[in-house]
Image: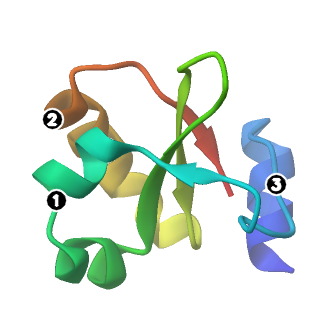
Amino acid sequence: LVTRAAAEVLDVPFVESLTNKRPAATFVQKFPISFARQHGVLAFVDEADAVSVAMANLDSWNVFDTVARLLGRHPAPLF
């Protein structure tokens, strides 16, 4: 509920499920799974090769810039 409200306030899409999303290979190569779990983030790529970073909650927002910088891309945020 709090994450959904944060998404609305920050004008960031909120997705119910990540089941149909494909993990971004660059994220998997550059970040250990322990980082993803600790910070609640994972990058995905869509059919157009656009990258988005899903964040588990508002606490993950602090890590978004770090992930973007290390990916060398400008991903779209998701909650």
* Lower sequence index among marks 3 and 2: 3
Point out residue 12 in the picture as x, y percentages from the top left corner. Answer: 74, 40
Q: Which mark is residue 14?
A: 3
Tags 2 and 1 in contact by the CB under 8 Å rule? yes
Circle 1 residue: 31
| Pointer 2 local density, CA inside 10 Å: few below 14, some 14–19, many at least 20 | few
Q: Quadrant of the N terminus?
A: bottom right
Q: Amino acid at mark 1?
A: Phe
Which sits in the foreground, 2 or 32?
Answer: 32
Q: Amino acid at mark 2?
A: Leu
Point out residue 66 in the picture as x, y percentages from the top left corner. Answer: 21, 43
* Lower sequence index among marks 3 and 1: 3
Which sits in the foreground, 66 or 51?
Answer: 51
Seen at 77% across and 52% down, the residue is: 7
* Lower sequence index among marks 2 and 1: 1
The quarter of the picture where residue 56 lies is bottom right
Left or right of residue 42: residue 22: right
Mark whose residue sits in front, 2 or 1: 1
Left or right of residue 42: residue 49: right
Seen at 41% across and 44% down, the residue is: 24
Point out residue 45 in the picture as x, y percentages from the top left corner. Answer: 54, 36
Secondary structure found at label 1: loop
Q: Which mark is residue 70?
A: 2
Marks 3 and 1 sit apart, C-alpha to C-alpha, by 23 Å
Q: Quadrant of the C terminus?
A: bottom right
Marks 2 and 1 sit apart, C-alpha to C-alpha, by 9 Å
Secondary structure found at label 2: helix
Left or right of residue 7: residue 55: left
| Pointer 1 local density, CA inside 10 Å: few below 14, some 14–19, many at least 20 | some
Mark whose residue sits in front, 3 or 1: 1
Q: Amino acid at mark 3?
A: Phe
